[in-house]
Each structure stands twice: as C-alpha cells, then as structure tokens.
Image: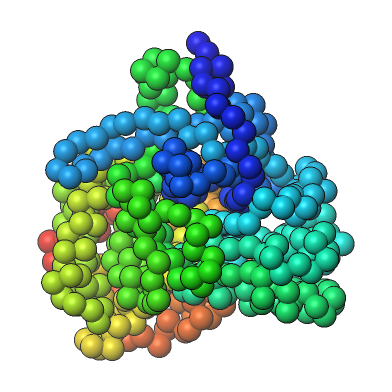
Amino acid sequence: MQKINEYYTRPYTRPERILQFGEGNFLRGFIDCLVDEANEKGVMDASVVICQPRSDSKVDVFNGQDCLYTLLTRGIENGETVDRAKIISCVSRCISPYRDYMEFLDLAKNEDLNVIVSNTTEAGIVFNGNDEPVDMPPSTFPAKLTAFLYARFKAFFGDITKGFLILPTELIEQNGDRLKEIVFAYAKKWELREEFIPWIEKSCCFANTLVDRIVAGFPREEMLSLEQRLGYEDRLVDVCEPFMQFFIQCDESFRDRIPFENLGFDVEFVDDLAPYRLRKLRVLNGAHTACVLSAFLEGNETLSEMMEDEKYAAFLTRLLNEEIVPFINMDEEELETFAEAVLSRLKNPFIKHRLIDISANSFSKFRVRDLTSIVEYYKVNGVAPDCLCYSLAALIRFYKGEFRDGKYIGTIGQTEYEIRDSLEILVDVSKAYESDDVIREILSNTSIWGIDLMQIYSLYDKVAAYFDDITEFGVTHTLEKIVKGENEA
C-alpha cells in the first residue's frame, strides 16, 4: 500500500510563518486544522514548523511522511452524523532541539515567521532556575522560547517589526500573561541585553487564549480497516470531534496574522476571556478529569467505552448538576445548556480517546479544573462534595506505583501502566505511599495543591473512605454506591 506522501503531493511549498511548540494530537486537530482551512480558502498562505518540546522524538515519523497526516472529524454536526477524512498539508517539517539545537535557533532568522503557538499541557508553562542560556537546549518550553526570541532579537538587530503573535493554548488562567512573565524572568536571570525586554514589549503580543475541542488522537485499533478505506498508510492519523471553540484576547494590530474568524468554526476575538474560561474549565474539563481515572481503573480503555456504561453517565449528571454548575456565577440557563452539550459530546461514539493518554499530569489537571469546585461547594454546604471526593480517591489510587527503569509504573489487577507527571509530583506521591496514611500526606501537601486540603471539613474522611472502598472492593462497587446515593463515606 502507498504511504500518504506517495498518495498525495503538496501543490507547492508555502512560506513558514508559524512555529509550533508541540507535535501532539491536540494542536494537529486544532491549530493546524485551522491553518489548513485558511490556506484552502485563500485567506492565509502559511506553513507550520513543528518543534518538539520534549526529548522523546517523533521527528523521523513526521518527516518520513513529509509531515502529512489525515484528520478524521467524527461526531454529530447539525443533528447529522459525520465521519469525514481530510489530509492536512500545512506542516512543512518537524524539528527537535534535542537533536539539532542550531536548526531550532536558525528558524529565528526566517523573516516570514510571525506566529508562535504552543501546547505543552498545564505543566509546561513553568520556570526552572537550573536552566541556563548555554544549555542546548534548556529544559522548559518558556526557556526555549526565551532563547528563540533572543536569537530573533539579535538576528534582526532589535527591529520591532520582526516580533511575534504568541498563542499559548495551555489550559491555565491568563496563559499568555503567565508565559510572558516567565520569559521575562529568564531574560533577567540570564542577564540578556537590556534592550531585549523592551523589544519584546514593543514587538510581541502574548495572547491569552481559550481552546475547546476533543481530539482523541491515533485510532490504532481500527487502522487496518481505516487504511483500506483511505487507500494509503498513515502513522499520524488524528481524530477530532466537529465541535470547536477558540477565544483569543490579543491586541487588534496582531489579529490579521491568524484570519480564522470566518472559516465555519467558532473562533472569536474577545476583550475578556474570564467567563468563557470559567465555564469550560469547570464544566467540560472538570467533568472530564473527574471520571477518566476511575474508568481506567475499572478496565475501560477509551472515553467512548466509559460513556457506554450507564453509571458514568449518571455519575457525570450528578456531578455537574449538584457539585459544579450551581456554584458558577453565570447565567443559569446558559450553564445548563452548556452542561447538556458536554454530556452529549462526551458520548460521541466516534471519539476513541484512550484514557491512559488523557491521564498525563492528572494531579495538576485536578488542581486547575476541579479543586475550585470542591472549595466553592464547601463554602456553601460546609462539607466536601461526594462525587469529587470519590474522583480524588480514584486519582490517588491511580498514582500508586513504583519507579522502574526511569519510569513510574502503576498496577491494577494484572495490568501495568505508565504514570506520567512531573518528577516532583511522582516523588511526592511515591513518598506518601511509604507513610502510614497516604491520604493525609497527599491532601496536606501544599506544593501539590497550593493549599492544605486537610482544612476542608469532611474531605479527608470522605476521600479516605472512598479510597479504602476502591482498594478493597474495586471501582465498580464504589461508584455504584455513589450513583445510587448510598454515600457511606
């Protein structure tokens, strides 16, 4: 069978205008989808250079098929079932700064380049005091970005017309502002030329963004039949839902660099992201994070498989209606409509989103997405919420593991799985499991949560009881009790 780059040839090479930190499923099913659509409709003429932010390289896979890949859009759209395939051709090449750091820095000399996008998860926008300007490369994404911007500054002698629109899509509050703060922190620590920070201020715009689309990734279980349907081999197939929302808060003078507003997707430039972010973070992402680890521990492999189980639909309905939606200060009808849409989207039978893939960085996800709902519920009711306490217990059980050959490995029944999170989190959890009271050690760890969760009345008792129940009787038994309202915790 032909490979995708033998089946399809780009009509011509477009200018490299976008540098993308992150080769993962989400950006390929979101930003690259938008760029490809804009190219096709003639409102943009751009290609994307992907830079891998981590050392586990897929460069050869990408470049081996000329960075072409198939995007499958599957789900319900305008009341009808859709299952369409499209070859995305806007990515020109993939590079790794760990393989060739100078190739990465040389990109800064490209005059056409004027947009930088990123998705490095919530744990990616961080400052590491051990990063130095002589590192090739520095460890964190913001440090790499600082080095790249400084290379740009030097290459064009501080020309303020050579700056970038920078679009972080990581799901943290004010993601652009936070990224800018860390870049400035690196610039000061590294004692870069004093004109550098003013150059960034004048020439670059760090946009705050909010993104929403379920991107399930590679459908490995159906690849044989899918390749027969497509007529070619593709090792980078990506699957997404039809739904997409992209809210961008940035200076008006930079907006024409991403003409995505009239492509048929819900893309909007806004003055205030706060209400949109709050709704998505606590309703969609909060619900998502609250159930996936429990489902994995029960033996489910994908999100759609989980949603076929009636007790998860019942759990999510109770979670949203009793513990999340009532404690968000927004229009009640609008929130209820959004919550109903969330349940519908999660039930999309086409989205084979692997739960083990979703599990990465779950502690930081729970802190960002669900902790506020626990606190707000407690303020009103004086006790901790049942469903979220159960979710927290499942999270802690999922992270029970051991370091082995440079990885942190968990076990449930006869199944082993890799637990992926920051080394600091994994070390803290591992140490907690060596103590007499793992729940107390984790809930009181302010470096994980930012606050001492032992101060929330009944939280410890409920989480500990659910944890013991999961350990002794399993997830199914415990979850069924919650769904039925038999909350002995």
Residue 2's place in the image compared with 285, above or below, is above
Residue 44's place in the image compared with 93, above or below, is below
Q: Toward the viewer: 5 or 64?
A: 5
Q: Toward the viewer: 454 or 148?
A: 148
Q: Quadrant of residue 394?
A: bottom left
> How many numbered discs sit on the rendered protein?
0
Q: Is residue 45 visible?
A: yes
The residue under the point 17% across, 59% down is 340
Q: Toward the viewer: 135 or 360?
A: 135
Quadrant in which the C terminus appears: bottom left
Position of residue 167 in the picture relative to residue 95 (left or right): left
Q: Is residue 482 visible?
A: no
Position of residue 85 in the picture relative to residue 434 (left or right): left
Q: Quadrant of residue 14?
A: top right
Q: Position of residue 29 (x, y in %)?
A: 44, 44
Position of residue 147 in the picture relative to residue 80 (left or right): right
Residue 54's place in the image compared with 7, above or below, is below
